[in-house]
Amino acid sequence: RGNFLYMMNRPKPTTIRRPSAAKPSGHPPPGDFIALGSKCGGESKAPAVLLKPASTLPADRKRETSSSLPSSSGLSGLVKRPKISSTPPVSALGRLADVAAVDKRAISPSIKEPSVVPIEVPPAVLLDEIENAEQDGNDDRIEGVLCGAVKQLKMNRAKPDITLYLSLMFLAKIKPNLFATEGIIEALCSLLRRDASINFKAKGNSLVSVLACNLLMAAYEEDENWPEIFVKVYIEDSLGERIWVDSSHCKNFVDNIQTAFSTKMPPKSMLLQLQTDTGRSGGDISAGSSPHPSTPDEDDSQTELLIAEEKLSPEDDGQVMPRYEELSESVEDYVLDVLKDQLNRRQPMDNVSRNLLRLLTATCGYKEVRLMAVQRLEMWLQNPKLTRPAQDLLMSLCMNCNSHGADDMEVISNLIKIRLKPKVILNHYMLCVRSLLNAHKDNLGTMVKLVIFNELSNARNPNNMQVLHTLLQHSPEQAPKFLAMVFQDLLTNKDDYLRASRALLREIIKQTKHEINFQSFCLGLMQERKEATYVDMEFKERFVIQVTDLLTCSMMLGITAQVKEAGVAWDKGEKKNLDGLRSFQNNIAAIQRDAVWWLHTVVPTIAKVPSKDYIHCLHKVLFTEQPETYYKWDNWPPESDRNFFLRLCSEVPLLEDTLMRILVIGLSRDLPLGPADAMELADHLVKRAAGVQSDDLDVLRVERIQLIDAVLNLCTYHHPENIQLPAGYAALFYCN
């Protein structure tokens, strides 16, 4: 029986142990036997540079790791790499290919061969050995004993010795700096790499990886500058089995590594809601991040794991702070190279790993990553196998578009073009749009502009109106102003876009169910623009006339079915349910006040509009112009509603500012409206407002005495300037 067990266990040390570079190398295994452990270790330890250890350590503690550790790499690892690339992966499903691809790109060109020799001692005497070595001042033995403990953990991943890992936890608690040497850091990182000797389906016990994460966290918790090797093992596990990257017990360590990417991650509540919605819709639940299946040994170790966790700093108390500020450029280059290699492979889109999408989600803090991901996002969202991670990626991408540079504007442009049909995915897309608007204040204007331009293009996205509706709901005050600016841009074109603009505006109002702030939209149409396009505009007079037309069209579009119904009831003498009608009338009065202000102060600075056109615009916004001028462009409103709509827009209150400004325009010699015409127009507006007087509607309230002065000044007779009067002649005349 003893010989049988010996023969069964004989290959195991061969697959894991590897002779040190300082010793003569042994003969290769006979026959076709493949040393899986050494190959995995040799590959996973592709040349990588470690940063200096914690600043609190003495200089003589900074040593290299032992090449005899399972995953340490020497020159032999580099020599055997071509053989690895030609040898099929251990897993039939090919997941080791992702890991191998990561290892092909080292963070730095080379690293000296490790020289620390592990010293294996029984777990029960580990603490005594460390204490004795400390008393003797033998730092080399401390490092060797700890590396030997790591080696024992690696050899017994499935069922690690409880005394061993609890002793390591205790040491990390009281003396974390013991673990901060280069040799020990390299050894612990070897525990975070996937061991190819473990059966793929079993995945092994994650307790060893969790232990390594917490030991590293304890060693580097107070250090602001972390080694790049942490990023390397994070990327490898992210693309591989995600044994510790997704573990809640390693969250603090993982969160600190992720500070290298400057990524703002979606809150858990949002992702949980996404999972719930996807589950209800019958989506692919398995496509999301789920706990890895455990072996029976792992279930038995959960209590032990919790005990070990309590002996470390609780994860909730751990601090998350930037750890890679000094190495941000090299880390970014490494991450981008890995992701480009993964994305540029010649493989069908169906074969893209869900873990690759999760890694993209975590690295969306890089603008290049956002640009690479958004170009493929539509295909991933439409793939049932990738729906969940693709939705997470979309959310992360939108939340991190916070620079509003050229790259992010390109990202937004690609987001606008994504076409989605399933309702649950479309709803999630709208939620991501809201996050995009919150990421940067300028994203709103860019989104509005790109959506409208896409709507007018030949490659129109059928979701444009729903996106625009989301924008208007998110920013009810600002979004209409940005929308108005886009309409201004359309009217500055050399070609006449008025007819198309009216049709587009009607469609927007219809699809958004009148959920738009018409007053903000109209005020946006009247804002003065200082861009060169407007200063050098060729058709300035046409621009003023067409903006006036859009203003009147907008006012009539504000008539909803409820307002129309209330107006009919008012005509019949009914006085119930008039709140909607009163609100509409007050909005029209406010828009007319703003329009008169625009004609008085802004229009004269834009262009010298001919007198006839200026007076036409003034009468048109006040709905005192001929009826055909309101519908001649496209026969809207329809004939059955024209008179009713015009009456609803004209029978509104008259605000004091509107009346006062009309009188001031009449007093101005620089504006075409003469004193007599101003008085006549003011008289007409006062009489029209008096006709709709009601107990629940205040149609005219004047509080400034200056208005009476303006009326009297308009009544003053001004003799023609081209006649000559006798010298010294002076007389006052008042019109009758």
Image: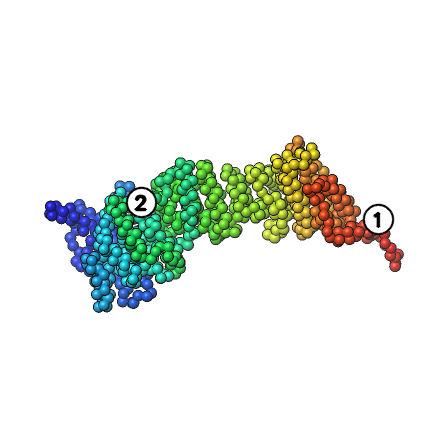
Residue most extreme to the top: 640
Mark 2 sits on what residue? 292
User: Foreground residue, 1 or 505?
Assistant: 1
Residue sitting nearer the eye, 259 or 219: 219
Task: Give the residue drawn at x 39%, y 61%.
Answer: 326
Q: In this view, does 120 lie to the left or right of 602?
A: left
Left or right, 702 with respect to 368, comes to right
The secondary structure type at the circle numbered 1 is loop
Compared with 654, 217 (above or below) is: below
Q: Where is residue 198 in the image (x, y as percent from the top left)?
A: 24, 47
Q: Report the Cα–Cα distance between label 1 and label 2.
A: 94 Å
Q: What amino acid is labelled 1 in the image?
A: Cys
Name the amino acid type tagged 2: His
The residue lying at 21 percent from left, 57 percent from top is 123
Q: Which residue is drawn at 23% across and 63% down?
A: 130
Q: Can residue 204 be seen in this view?
A: no
Q: Is residue 396 visible?
A: yes
Q: Name the residue under label 1.
A: 735
Residue 307 vs residue 183, the one in the foreground: 307
Location of residue 50 in the rendering, given as x and y in whole percent from the top left corner: 31, 59
